[in-house]
Image (cartoon, helix red, strand yellow):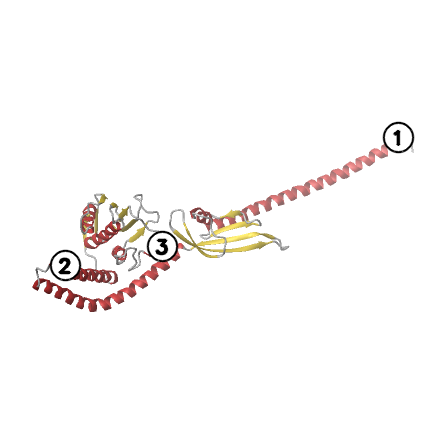
Amino acid sequence: MSQTQRQQTAVDGLDEMARAVAAVSGDLLASYERLERRASHMEAELESRVGELEAVLASLPTGVAVRDAQGEVVRSNEAYDELVASAAAPLSGADGEHSFMGADGAERHIYRKSSEVFSATGARLGSVEIVDDRTELYDLTERVHHMNKMAALGTMATGIAHEIRNPLNAVQGYSELIRHRLSGDEELDLWTASIIAGVREVDGIISSLLTIARPEPLYLESFELEEVCREAAARAFEGDSSQWSVEIVATDDALTGDRIKLRQALRNLIANAVNAQPDGGSVRVTASGDAERTTFCVEDAGAGFNHSTAARCREPFFTTRAEGCGLGLPLVETIVRLHGGQLEIDPRGSDLGGASISFWVPTNPRN
């Protein structure tokens, strides 16, 4: 074979190889395009599924967090983030029920449960943590428990009030008779006056118990907020009030309610604020309203409430004062609830330095 023929053969072989490479390249390009389309479809479907999962996660009322193998949170929903943000300290990592003090000073109650996540080969990938905010359920349970206690207290108070008042009336009557017949004896007058004062105090406790247990129907009338605040403040002091500074800040609004009962509720709150400052101090009473509700607030510069006393101060007979009977705040709450309102204790306290207790009632319950 001549040199020319060998060159021609080589050229023909190269052409054939080029055609083969072109054909393979075309097949590879077509396969690549199919794979690219499939990958794009799968990516879009994956993004859609991930978006659906993200939407479900975000809509859950329960807090959910996904942690990696090192325990770091890699994904969480809004409910979880809000719980973490509301805590004054890191949440406990143990499963079960927990309570913590929120950044706003209010107590929160949660239930935590976690589960580890493993791959198909058994390798630990991380964990899923579920945190359920049970504060409202806890508060509702406490409220039902409180109502049951009040019902039991009502049964007891109704049963013994008559039996106690009869001998009390006798004690007071004979004390008045002794004072009248032996008038002029200063020491005897002092003793009988103490007996009569004690009888009246016990009778007042019985009256408070009966009011808490069996509140009388409301007598509704319209009155000015400032007027009822000043009347309550005047009745809160038993003697000289010069040691205390009482500021009343009330709008010109009017309220429809039981004036006597609401005045009694305000009087009890102001008296508590005064008693919290036995050596004198500041008391502020504010009242304002709109078409829906009217709010009263009493603040003082006393010691305020700690977590324990704030949780128990609504209980009948619970008091931090040796001379107190512990019925003032339960009576206030009874009157407020009778009006369809709510009593609230601000866990942050007052800017005066002490407690801040408020209640709201409907502005016009006839509507």
Identify the secondary structure beneath mark 3: helix
On the image, numbered disc 1 is attached to which residue? 4
On the image, numbered disc 3 is attached to which residue? 308
Q: Is residue 68 left or right of residue 235?
A: right
From where the camera sits, is residue 364 visible? Answer: no
Which of the two discs, 2 and 3, sits closer to the camera?
Answer: 2
Q: How many numbered marks appear? A: 3
Location of residue 52 in the rendering, given as x and y in whole percent from the top left corner = 51, 49
User: What kind of residue is marked 2?
Assistant: Leu
Q: Is residue 173 left or right of residue 269?
A: left
Indicate which disc, 1 or 3, sits on the residue closer to the N terminus: 1
From where the camera sits, is residue 190 visible? Answer: yes
Q: Nearer the viewer, residue 72 or 323?
A: 323
Q: Is residue 267 left or right of residue 54?
A: left
Residue at 85% over, 32% down: 8
**Quarter in which the N terminus is drawn:** top right
Instruction: Spot the residue most to the right.
Output: 1
User: Looking at the image, is 1 positioned above or below residue 187?
Assistant: above
Which of the two discs, 2 and 1, sits closer to the camera?
Answer: 2
On the image, numbered disc 2 is attached to which residue? 190
